[in-house]
Amino acid sequence: MNQILEINKLTKRYDNYTLNELSFSVPQGYIMGFIGPNGAGKTTTIKSIMKMVHPDSGEIKVFGESLSDSNEYNDRIGYVMDNPFYCESWTVQGVEKAVRGFYKHWDSKVYADYISRFQLEPTKTVKALSRGMKVKLMLAVALSHGAELLILDEPTSGLDPVAREEVCDILREFITDEKKGVIFSTHITSDLEKVADYITFILNGRLIYTGPRDELIESYVRVAGAQKALNEALREKIIGLRDHGVGFEGLMRREDIAMLSSDVEAESTTLEEIIVFMNKGEKNNG
């Protein structure tokens, strides 16, 4: 399987935080969901890919070339962040005039088609756009210069369900070309459960998991029961234990559920619960 993005032992040290030897890859033709709580290192990773942060060590390859050796990938990566960096006085038409010179393969017809599809008024200023419209504007730009890799850094936070579904539809369309790929960082894990093929999960700068989405979700169960069922052996196996005095809940590896008594319920979990319970477990052990 060809990899459109490869990250190997990426490390960046700050005074109170370290992104520690992070490694994962994004295959062509797939969407990689990038998850973790605030401060986990997702934005540092993305900014390293975009050359906005200089890592201390490690290697990043895009399209098979080391990032340090490749300077000709501007057209090939579409970057969508949580807020546009466009001047607020620019119109939707003016955004095209301002950015098209940076891309060798800019396609004005494609941009016009997306502006029409997204119902963006060409004469409206960036300042006058709603948050959802600003995200659509950034997507229109990202998709109008022949990008092969889309990188999305929290673009759907604050969007209503209809707008989020539109973004998900665009991503599904994008990867129908099996040479393309997406890395999608978001806190809205229900979106990833719809569109992501793979998940990379980081916590406090460390890699927790990278691989197929369903494999991660199926590896854990959410458990809950009465206080009397919480013995020491069980307590050691529960991740992110919430002890309510009369009952408890937490996350547990599916492989360990044979030890559960009839007083403890085990049910399927979600990406959101995995993040929440693992983050709580990390704090409890810190």
Image: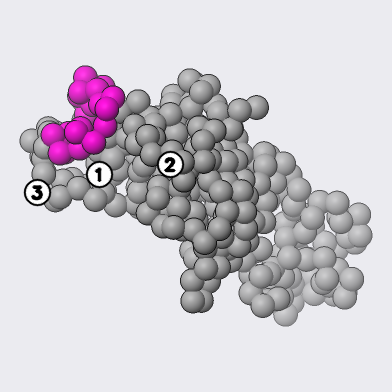
Q: Which residue is drawn at 76% across and 48% down?
A: 219
Which of pointers 3 and 2 lies earlier in the amino acid sequence?
3
Q: Name the residue under label 2.
A: 151
Is residue 162 visible in the rendered image? The answer is no
**36 vs 266, nearest the viewer:** 36
Which of pointers 1 and 3 lies earlier in the amino acid sequence?
3
Mark 2 vs mark 1: give the one in front.
Answer: 2
Instruction: Locate the N terminus and report the quarter of the image it occupies.
Output: top right
- Distance of mark 3 from mark 2, alpha carbons? 26 Å
Which of pointers 2 and 1 lies earlier in the amino acid sequence?
1
Q: Is residue 222 left or right of 36 when viewed as pictured? A: right
Q: Is residue 12 left or right of 153 when viewed as pictured? A: right
- Residue 190 at x, y percent in the picture: 53, 45
* Secondary structure beneath label 1: helix
Name the dominant secondary structure of the magenta segment.
Answer: helix
Residue 130 in the image: above or below residue 2: below
- Residue 226 at x, y percent in the picture: 79, 70
Q: Residue at x 45, y 53 (%)?
A: 48
Q: Mark 1 points at which residue?
A: 134
- Residue 255 at x, y percent in the picture: 86, 51
Q: What residue type is labelled 3?
A: Ser
- Residue 121 at x, y percent in the picture: 13, 33
Q: Name the residue under label 3.
A: 89
Badge 1 crowding class, 10 Å Cα cut-off, few under 14, some 14 to 19, many 20 or more, is many
Mark 1 vs mark 3: give the one in front.
Answer: 3
Q: What residue type is labelled 1?
A: Lys
Magenta-tinted stretch: 95-115
Q: Is residue 230 left or right of 78 when viewed as pictured? A: right
Say whether residue 69 is magenta. no
Q: Which amino acid does label 2 sit on?
A: Ile
* Secondary structure beneath label 3: loop
Q: Is residue 50 left or right of 286 when viewed as pictured? A: left
